[in-house]
Amino acid sequence: MSVTQTDQPRDTAQDTVWVQDVSFIDSIPRSVAMTFVLLVFIGSWQMATSLGLVSPIILPTPLETLQDMIFVGKNLLTGGYMLEALWITLKEVFYGFALAIFLGFTLGVLVGETAFGEKAVMPYLVAIDTMPKVAFAPLFVAWLGFGIESKVALAAFIATFPIVVGTAAGLHAADENARMLFKTMGASRMQTLIKMKLPTGLPQIFTGLKIGAVGVMAGAITGEFLGGGKGFGELIRIAASQLNTPRVFSLILYLSLVGLALYVLVTWTQRKVVFWHKERVGAHDG
Amino acid sequence: MNSAIATQAHSGAQLGAPVYELSNVSKTYARNQVVALDDVSLTLRKSSFSSVIGSSGCGKSTLLKIMAGLIPPTSGRVVLQDRPVTGPRRDIGMMFQHATLFPWRTAVENIVLPIEIRDGRAAAKKALEKAHELLDIVGLKGFENVYPNELSGGMAQRASICRMLITEPAVLLLDEPFSALDELSRDMMNMELQRICREQHATAFLVTHSIQEAVILSDHIYVMKPRPGRLAEIVEVDLPRPRTLDMMTTPKFGAIVDYIRGLLDKGEDM
Ligand SMILES: Nc1ncnc2c1ncn2[C@@H]1O[C@H](COP(=O)(O)OP(=O)(O)OP(=O)(O)O)[C@@H](O)[C@H]1O
Ligand SMILES: [Mg+2]
């Protein structure tokens, strides 16, 4: 009697269906959660300014900022002086990044491939990489003047190091099995580099490129702050000196869009090139 | 030891001509002065299947790497098909514990990689047809254009067999090729390996930790002893060919397994 009972599946849903625990937070889509945080942020910002907790000279209201963004947007779209400034900054970022990619990749391969580079050059590169590199800005201005060159140089200088380090690390990512396999196939050093070590190291190389993309923006703007010129950084500096904080905010937001676009471009390229390497956005599945 | 050498000479008469000849091969790793191999001599004959078995660290992989021309011996001679081995050779096919397929290449592109490296892209393209045939042989038809991260461990190892075979090597050097697989797939892969070796008339040399695996596959089993690594005995397996998995239950199979286990246990006391 008792035996037949235990053999029968009990028919209450709770016992037969195994329901995975889903917490409330897990059930919210990422986009909704992010919008929520943004609204809370703008809400507190509006509160802080409209209640007079912060002086409007220090912090403009969200509405003022939005109005100024529309103004700046119009100027950009109609080809005004701000578009010219943006164009200059874009050029600095583009040339700086291109230079950094070329230098970073070349140096990274030399350092990662040769025992001498690894032993004697790499420690210096790591040491310089830990330095606050923007501190070199006045030097670049002194060397290259107030034109676009000093900004390109600073941007490239900042972005080169993460690319070198990423490339060199990437070339060491291949495991012993892969190396041994290439050896058994009688591969030359060049073949091993191109057909095995570089593809294996692409995820690290792209990590370096992403850090470099952030650095190249910082470099260009810092260069403009310290070295003058006619770029977007100069517009920010002027607006700040006139205590036009809504303008500063809106210019920074536009600049962030440029930085974001660059980052997205690198990430998109990575997805296309390193198609086999699945990278997750956050720590949680989402 | 003497009787072992006699056995080898006896069975050698039945099999083909010598393919691999190692004489007095020793290896001391300079880095840590470990004597990994001490005075190893052996002869592999055409179309024979031999295994080497011994405790971990006794020098099996070192022996295989020297035979493959991946590392030089400290002293001694390695001759393959009448030419001394002084580096990697195209008549040697090698397989390791890990399949090591490259994730940016499809299965078939991974298989023609050795051709691409040796003879260039054009030759690799011509070899595609043969790669398809090999995939068919190992039961991977339909997976030609699949990327490795969609293959199971056993399927990946099959693909790596194809990569080894595409250059039509005269000898196959196998370093625990299936030890990462579960027992069922492993048995299947072993039978597959036997069939491939028969069809290709390949000479095979297998490193393994499994006595059963060694016995079911081999004509000769080289038992190694550690510190310093050396050949202690050569056991001949005279089970009929082709071997089947059923043979693993026969008394004869059991007796050979027990005998080798006895040799290995003795080695541990030393
Ligand atoms: N590159 C190396 N440098 C220095 N010593 C080494 C090197 N490779 C192996 N050895 C040493 O040589 C000895 C034999 O190593 P080997 O890898 O040939 O053993 P093995 O029989 O293949 O072991 P396992 O069954 O665990 O794979 C070990 O004592 C090991 O520490
Ligand atoms: Mg080993």
Image: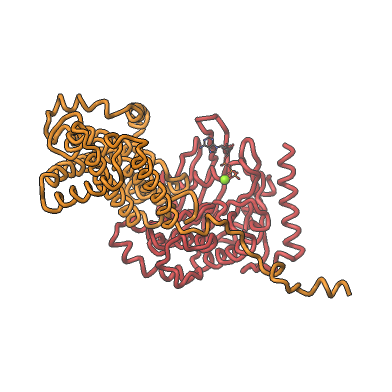
**Image quadrant where one finds the N terminus of chain A:** bottom right
Q: How many marks can you see? A: 0
Residue closest to the eye, A47 or A166: A47
Q: Residue at x 30, y 48 (%)?
A: A263
Residue closest to the eye, B182 or A73: A73
Residue B226 placement, left or right of B256: left
Residue B90 placement, left or right of A58: right
Residue A107 seen in render: no
Residue B136 lies, in percent from the top left, at 46, 71
Residue B31 lies, in percent from the top left, at 50, 30
Q: Quadrant of ligand 1?
A: top right
Query: Looking at the image, what colour scheme do you see?
Result: by chain
Residue B159 seen in render: yes
Relative vertical location of residue B138 with respect to residue A237 in this rendering, above or below? below
**Shown colour of chain B:** red
Residue A195 lies, in percent from the top left, at 34, 51
Residue B32 lies, in percent from the top left, at 54, 29
Q: Residue at x 47, y 63 (%)?
A: B150
Outermost residue, right direction?
A: A1
**Shown colour of chain A:** orange
Residue closest to the eye, B250 or B109: B109
Quarter of the figure with residue B211: bottom right
